[in-house]
Each structure stands twice: as C-alpha cells, then as structure tokens.
Amino acid sequence: MIEFAGSLLLNLAYFAAFLAVTSLVVFPFYYAVLSSADRGEDRTGAGLFWNIMFWLVVVLICLIAIFPFYYAILTSLETGTAIFRVNYLPESFDLRNYESVLGGRSFVRSVLNSVFIAATTVIFALFLAVTASYALARVRFRGRGLLLMTILAVSMFPQIAVLSGLFELINWLGIYNTPWALILSYTIFTLPFTVWVLTTFMRDLPVEIEEAAIVDGATPWVIISKVFLPLLWPALVTTGLLAFIGAWNEFLFALTFTVDETKRTVPVAIALLSGASEQEIPWGPIMAASVIVTVPLIVLVLVFQRKIVAGLTAGGVKG
Amino acid sequence: MANIQLRNVTKSYGSVTVIKGIDLEIRRGEFMVFVGPSGCGKSTLLRLISGLESISTGDLYFDGERVNNVIPSKRGIAMVFQSYALYPHMNVYENMAFGMKLGGAGKGELDQRVRQSAKLLQIDHLLDRLPKQLSGGQRQRVAIGRAITRDPRVFLFDEPLSNLDAALRVATRLEIAKLHHDMRDVTMIYVTHDQVEAMTLADRICVLRDGRVEQVGTPTELYERPDNIFVAGFIGSPKMNFLEGEFAAAQGCSTLGVRSEHIDIVPQGAGMWTGTVVHAEDLGSDNYLFVDIGAKEPIIVRQPGKVTIPEGATISLQPRPGMLYRFDDTGRPVQAPLAAE
C-alpha cells in the first residue's frame, strides 16, 4: 500500500515536471508568436528580440522532436563497434542492417500484419465514429451529455487496467492470436477520441444545411453519407491518421494477444529481434527496423497534410 | 396549391412555451408574411409548418389533411433559408437537383426542371459553379432555384434577404414578388422582421408578438386600421407617434397615436400642439422633423420636399382630422366617437 502510494506520488511528480518543462518551452513560444503578431513588420528593439526568441524556440522544438529519429537513422547505418561511438554527423553508410532486417524470417510479414490491422481499425473506427457522432451532435436525446462524458472517461483508462478483461473477452470470442483481436482492441481504444473529435466537427457544421437536406427528403443515412461526409473530409483524414498511428505503434496489446511469429505486428517484431547471442542487443537492426516502420507514417502525414484543406464549408452558408 | 390551416397550435420547449395557441388560415396561392420583433416566434411558426419542428399541441392541415406527423419532404414544401444553406461540395446544378434525385425523378425530367428553373432565375450560366464561387445574391437565387425545382405546394422563406446588402435586397425583393406573380397557385409564407418587406410583398400580413397573433390582414388594413397599439407601432416607418398624459386625455383616450405624415404645420398658434424643432433628417424626398411639444419623446413630422424650418424654430402643429388613433389603457382602439367634435 505504501509502495503504491509512493509510486503514485512519483508519477505525480513526473507529471508535474513534464508540465513545468512543457510550459517553460511553450510559454516563450506562445508569447513570441503573440508579440510578433502584434508588432508585425515593426523593427523596434523589443520586436526584434521577440522575433529572435520565436525562431530560437522553433529551432529548439524541432531539435527536441527530430533528434531521436535523426539519431536512429545514424545508428541504423552503422555496424559493429561504430554503433557505440557517439557521433552527431553521418560517418558511415552501411545498409547491412536493413538487409538483415528485411531478410529476416518474418519482418515483412509483420509489416503487412500492421498495415492490415491499422487500416481495418481506421475503417471500423471511422464508420462507427461518424454514425455515433451524428447522433451525439445532432439528435436531441436525454443523457447525451452524460454519454459524451462517459465516452471521454473510458478513454482515460490505462491500457493495463483493461488488459485482463479484454483478454477474457477475446478468448470468449475465439479470436485470440488473430488480427481481429488487435483490430477489436484498437478500435475500442481509438473510438472515444475519434467520436469526440468528429462530434465537435459535426456540431460546427451549419444546421441549415442539414435542414435543407431534410426538406429535400434526405434520410439520416443520406445526410451523413451524401452531405456531411464530403464536408467532414478534413476531420476524417486527421482522426483517421491519428487512429492509424495509434494502431501502428501499439505494443502492449500486440504483445499480449499474439503468440505466433507470423501474427505479430511491427512494434512487437522489433522488440523481439534477437542478436547472435542472448547477451547481445542488436541495436543496428532494431534501428533499421524502426526507420523502416516510421518512414511510411511520415509519408502518410506529409501526403494528407496537403489534403487537410481548411474552409471546405465556405460558400454553403453566408460569409 | 395548398390551403393551410392552423388550429390552436402551440410549441413548447420543456417548460417554455414559444407559440401560445395560434389559429390561422392561409389561403391557396396567397403570399402570407409573418412579421414581428425578434423572439416573437415567427421563425418557429414557419418551422412548425415546414415540419422541421414538431407541433406540441393543436392541428395543422394542408388542404384539409392533417399533416402534424408528416415528414417535411412529404408535405410538398420547399424552404429558402436565411443563410442560403447550399450544399458546399455540390455545384449549382447538383444543389438544385439533389431533392428531385432523392425523390427518384427520372434523369430527363430532372434535367429539364433544373434548367427551366435556372433560366427563370437567370442563373443558367452558373450551373457548374460551386457555392463559394458565387456572390451573396447569386447564392440566394440558387437557394430559391433549388426550392422552385422541387415544384412545391408551399414555399417557405425564412428571412431570405437579411444577409444581402441594401441594393441587392430591393432587387431580390422584386424578384420574389415577380415569382409570386408567375406562380399564382403556390402558397408562399415569408418570415421577416422588416416591415417594409412585409408591406411590399404580402397579400396578407400576420403580425406576431410573444407567440401570439396580434392581427392578420392586408397591408392596408394593418396600416389604416390597426387592432391594437402594438400593431400600430410596428407597422409603418417612421414609427407612429404615441402621446400620453394630457395630450391623450384631451382626445378621450389613454394613448394617442398619429402617423408622421398626418401632421401639418400650420400658422403660429392655429395648431393643436406647439413645439420646437430639435432635429431634422433630410432624406431628399422627405424631411423628418423631430418636434418637442412637451411629451415624453419628440414627435416626428414628415414633410415632403426640402426643409425650410431651421432647428430651434418654434412651430405649430395640427393633426389631420380623422387620422388620429386612440387607444385605451389595454392597448385596444377606443370605439366611442370623439366628444369634442
């Protein structure tokens, strides 16, 4: 009991430290953005100072965000003892790690598993979330606020808390050690977030458009599919992408609900990569594998970023 | 094409009653305008007729058929919204065709109807555009076009002009009047808070206040024979002058109303009232003189032509005989003849 209280305190302390550091970094940034927006092109001393601060913080944030990935790429291109020398600039260009990963017994299979599971999760989650959020945003019924709050509360459960219950459920459904076990659990964990985001978006769509469709004789399903869905594309892309990333990176469920090597997803496959001996951790291949699975995500984000066009609803109603 | 009857219709949201029992008959092919201050329930009433809101108690009949529980698309209505409510991702053609397509109309018939109504509203060159590529006036025309295409029995307008600028508003108003002329047997119901729109468009006006009908009648009836003080003050611009206290008591009523165009400037001392000009508004064709005669507010006197009376001048005013509106303390017109005359 005392141990538990201790770890709880420790957790709180971590969280507080995280908040403190974040606000230390974010606040100057926020202030700099505000003041540079205020001053515009003004070349006063203070304006210049905050401009410099702004860019300094931008660089800092980029460094913090990008450095780990950059270092992973560097390491993935090194072999042997070179891996353990600390260097910040590329020194060797050696693709042997990539060869060993891709030539491994089931890595490619794991990637395909991950793609299938993540994509199916996204499809299920979006379908359920779009229909649910239409009801939550547009249909007046008793207990709607309570339902929304419950959905939000569900998303706060730590994964480990529901793991055993979910395991029972999956066994009962007879989908243990199949992709469907992961699809089910990922959908469960993605839905609260997806529903909330889509509900907010759906609420902001003009009511008159829906009413015009009702007068035109549209059923709720037609309203969702023919009228709202085209307007919700930006939100769907964003939430879909986040659901995809969540499913793609998830580790705990993937480790628990699969046994066979051929059923694993990428994070588990990476974690279970083994070296020549038990003592050796194969850092090179691990880094190569990490780079291989991260690149598709970055590409996805870059591609869809262009699709996230703001103001798609412009013109339908006034303004 | 429909005769609409409302029998003791009410609408409540929880414990708040917005529409407090309305009996109204809207005749076939009539242009009926609901007018009233904001919050009077005129838009709610329109939405009850459209079916977008359900009626709490009372009955609604279209051509004698009770339609309380009929869904909007089956009532044969078309609605034009204040904010246009076009589908942003569809071009003008698709916007206009959407309703008919859902209704299962054949391609040829649909195409013909869309092009016909586009032509009527002179938007046939815009059919490929998206709503965001149109100006406000064009958008509102598309919204009207979308409504026409459905060939409705009843046309509902919910403040369709209030998002347009003044010049466009007048032009579109004319167009709606023309539309009513062309579609003689379609019943039109139009909601506005602008009494000028109401006066110019309506066959009959229904003045609403606080969820109740104050008066129904032709524009002339409402203007010349208001049923109560509220209608008298609401219809007409500038607002009718209201005098209380001794001014009213002299005419045997508690509130005396007189329209600004029914007051003449007479030689000094010859008028019923005397006062000083505190302000003058020159509208070009008319002048509004604000004259302080000792009542609570200055009264407005409308004079055609150029003003020749400077501010600060003392003038004598005489209301035209028979043009005085007398109301008792409940706001109803006083029926008894004027004792003094």
Image (cartoon, rainbow, N blue to C red):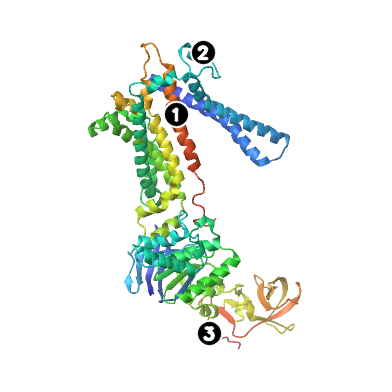
Subunit ID for the residue under disc 1: A
The percent coordinates of residue A184 (x first, y second) are 31, 35
The percent coordinates of residue B134 (x first, y second) are 54, 59
Subunit ID for the residue under disc 3: B
In the rendered image, residues at marks 2 and 1 fall on the same chain: yes
Residue B66: give its label. none
Q: Do the CB atoms of the residues marked 2 and 3 lie less than 8 Å apart?
A: no
**x 48%, y 69%: residue:** B119
Q: Do the CB atoms of the residues marked 1 and 3 lie less than 8 Å apart?
A: no
The C terminus of chain A sits in image quarter:
bottom right
Amino acid type, callout 2: Arg
**x 47%, y 32%: residue:** A298
The mark lying in front, picked from 1 and 3, is: 1
Q: Which residue is mark 3?
A: B336
Labels in figure, total? 3
**x 37%, y 65%: residue:** B108
Q: Which residue is mark 1?
A: A294
Amino acid type, callout 3: Ala
Residue B197, quarter of picture: bottom right
The percent coordinates of residue B48 (x first, y second) are 40, 65
- Left or right of B314 on screen, residue A75: left
- Left or right of B217 on screen, residue A225: left
**How far is disc 2 from disc 3 in space, using C-alphas?**
110 Å
Q: Is residue B230 visible?
A: no
The percent coordinates of residue A175 (x first, y second) are 25, 32
Crowd tier of the residue under label 2, counting other residues whose Cα lies within 10 Å: few below 14, some 14–19, many 20 or above: few
As helix, strand or loop, the secondary structure at mark 2 comes to loop
Subunit ID for the residue under disc 2: A
As helix, strand or loop, the secondary structure at mark 1 comes to helix
